Amino acid sequence: MEKILTILIERNSYTARTSVGDMFFLYDKEYVTPVPRNIRERFGYTLEDTVRPENIKVYGETGIPSGVRCKVRLYESDHHGKTIIFYTEEDGVTLKWKELSWTYVLAHGGNTHIDTMACVLVAKNKISNDMIQGSLKDELRIFIENKIKEGYTIEAEFINLTQLS
């Protein structure tokens, strides 16, 4: 039976420039039962570019559509250093959803939409619906690296929740 860890990104606050949410890990921590008993472990806040209808993309200003499931692997960027990358295609850097595609969708530190370019910012603190703070990029990379060493396959899923406020 394959050991799978899913990085779940649940967005819950939306502005004209950003989508803010939470990052969770879903996996069977003990992996001792034939039917996995997934736990849901919160990791931190996320900030991305605004999400748009699934057939619309503005370069550098559109988050990954809700419902996308993709693969995740370790990646090293000249600009962001050691991190992870989200992808669907064999080249390991392209993420496609229907007719649209993104390249080099990384998880890294940053504070506002200026830092995103379709990447997922991950941090400890939510300052507002337009700003997060306290990068968790290194902690995320280490956690995922360790799970890969433990034999987990890493996937991700992007979900848009209803904005309640």
Image (spheres, rainbow, N blue to C red):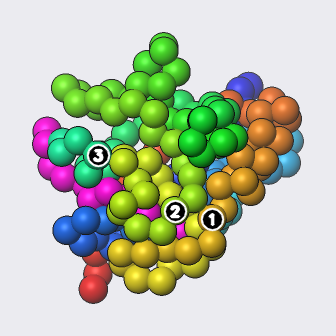
What's under tag 2, amino acid-wise? Gly
| Residue topped by disc 1 | 135
Residue 40: give x, y in percent of width and height.
64, 60
What's under tag 1, amino acid-wise? Ser
| Residue topped by disc 3 | 60
Mark 2 vs mark 1, CA separation in Å: 7 Å
Q: Secondary structure at mark 1?
A: strand
| Left or right: residue 157 compared with residue 72 | left
Displayed quadrant of residue 54:
top left
Marks 2,1: beta carbons within 8 A: yes
| Left or right: residue 19 compared with residue 15 | right
Identify the residue at image location x=27%, y=59%. Answer: 50
Give above or below for 39 relative to 117. Answer: below
Q: Tag on residue 123? A: none
| Left or right: residue 81 compared with residue 99 | right
What's under tag 3, amino acid-wise? Gly
Which sits earlier in the primary sequence, circle 2 or circle 1?
A: 2
Q: Which residues are magenta?
A: 45-56
Mark 1 residue crowding within 10 angstroms, few (<14) / some (14–19) / many (20+): many
Q: Tag on residue 110? A: 2
Name the quarter where the C terminus is drawn. Answer: bottom left
Mark 3 residue crowding within 10 angstroms, few (<14) / some (14–19) / many (20+): some
Q: Residue furthest top?
A: 90
